[in-house]
Amino acid sequence: MITEYTTQQSDQKFIKGFSKLSKKQKIELISKYFKNPAYAIEILKRYHHEDADTQKLFDEFSENTLSNFYFPFGVAPNFVINHKNYVIPMVIEESSVVAAASSSAKFWSDRGGFRSMVLSTTKIGQVHFSWKGHREKLEKVMPRLKEELIAGSDHITINMNRRGGGIREIELVDMTSYMENYYQLKVNFETVDSMGANFINSCLEEFASILKTFIANHELFNDDEKDISIIMAILSNYTPDCLVRAEVECDITEFDGIDAAMDGHEFAWKFDRAVRIAQIDPHRATTHNKGIFNGIDSVALATGNDFRAIEASGHTYASRNGKYSSLTEVSINGNTFNYSLEVPLAVGTIGGLTSLHPLAKLSLELLGNPDAKELMTIMASVGLANNFGALKSLVTKGIQHGHMKMHLLNILNHFGATEEEKKEAVHYFADKKVSFARVAEYVANKRK
Ligand code: MEV
């Protein structure tokens, strides 16, 4: 029986058994939370896919699904990365991100393009446990324990081993100086072309159970020491050893003409300052890195990768020296301007959503079906391109100039402008500053 109920502690309404309802029942129940339930139902249904199988696929990605939430799927052409030409699929709702990536791509494709290299591909997982005993004893049994962990997780690792991946290293970490009786098994994995979260977590849970049995049965430990408490077993999304670098380089005079108000040297100087400010000041660094993730996340979304994991890792990496800082760097040697991004990217091109979401599959095809390493080089280059686009605007005309031009259509849509009105407005604002108030005034005047 499905019920809505309140508790003694609160007069909030709770729903019991919601997940057991059919999709139709869920929509009907939730529609009552809106001022106009009929309208809410209409909107939720409007975004259902007309093909029942496709809709079922989407419903099964998550739970309690009522509808689909559309994001624009666009492309940034003209990316040259390691001498190869790419059209990059990007899924993002923010106007001007694709435009910035495209214009940076074009600029750098005329100057040799992006160079990008994968520096490492190791991922980490941890079994966190609590154990009272002498550390030396644990250290003594580690070689045997490692053998048992490897052998006992064979059924999980067999396919990954065949693909060239698997468990690389198992280490005992003594954390007792941070918390009493706290230890870790820290495990290095290679997951080749899959992001590997499921593989890593399955291995770690198996390890946890093997560890518990091993300690309980080993003759070296007395009764007290046989008591081990597994706290948790989980991958770490911080992947500083799954790292990629992207860079571009040119002669400073190549920036002549990039802006009417300054020559190449002044541009390079201001650009360098802008990056250094992001290296010094965490407030600026956060926005600076956000712009990098505008590019990286939109490719992650388009290719069905886990953008939350990527972001989490990137921001931790940005703090690796004890203070949150820029992920990009500039070096100027004589007249040579070198600009680079180093970022951890744990991505996959097989498994998960990459092969289930029809548009993710299409995105990967558009990229030439890259392996995970190639996708890392692509994403890092797009991140660098977006950072270049943002800084280029910031140190010249300011960000709002281009941003608001792109945002004009959103504002016009807000006022329900017709296609004709939009065309006229775009023409009218071509040489004027766009602001919400100005567009509102313009629309009101036009409609008088
Ligand atoms: C906006 O989404 C991103 C920027 O703020 C990035 C930056 O300031 O570097 C433009």
Image: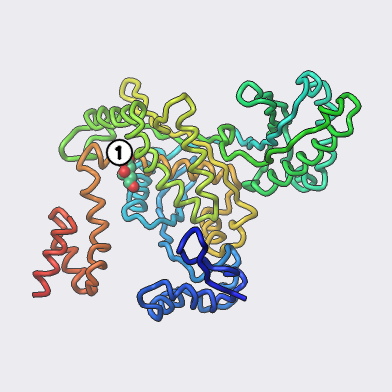
Along the line of sight, the residue nearer the viewer: 256 or 297: 297
Q: Nearer the viewer, residue 133 or 84?
A: 133
Q: Residue at x 49, y 34 (%)?
A: 316
Q: Quadrant of the N terminus?
A: bottom right
**Dividing the picture into quarters, in which one does residue 142 lie?**
top right
Task: Residue 59: give x, y in percent of width and height.
Answer: 57, 69
The quadrant of the picture occupied by the C terminus is bottom left
Is residue 263 toward the left or the right of residue 317 in the image?
left
Left or right: 87, with 260 as reference point: right
Quadrant for ligand 1 reads: top left
Q: Is residue 56 visible?
A: yes
The one of 145 and 7 positioned closer to us in this rendering: 7
Determine whether 297 is above or below 64 in the image: above
Q: How far from the left and from the top, in percent, is residue 258?
A: 24, 40
Q: Is residue 174 above or below residue 300?
A: above
Q: Is mark 1 within 8 Å of ligand 1?
A: yes
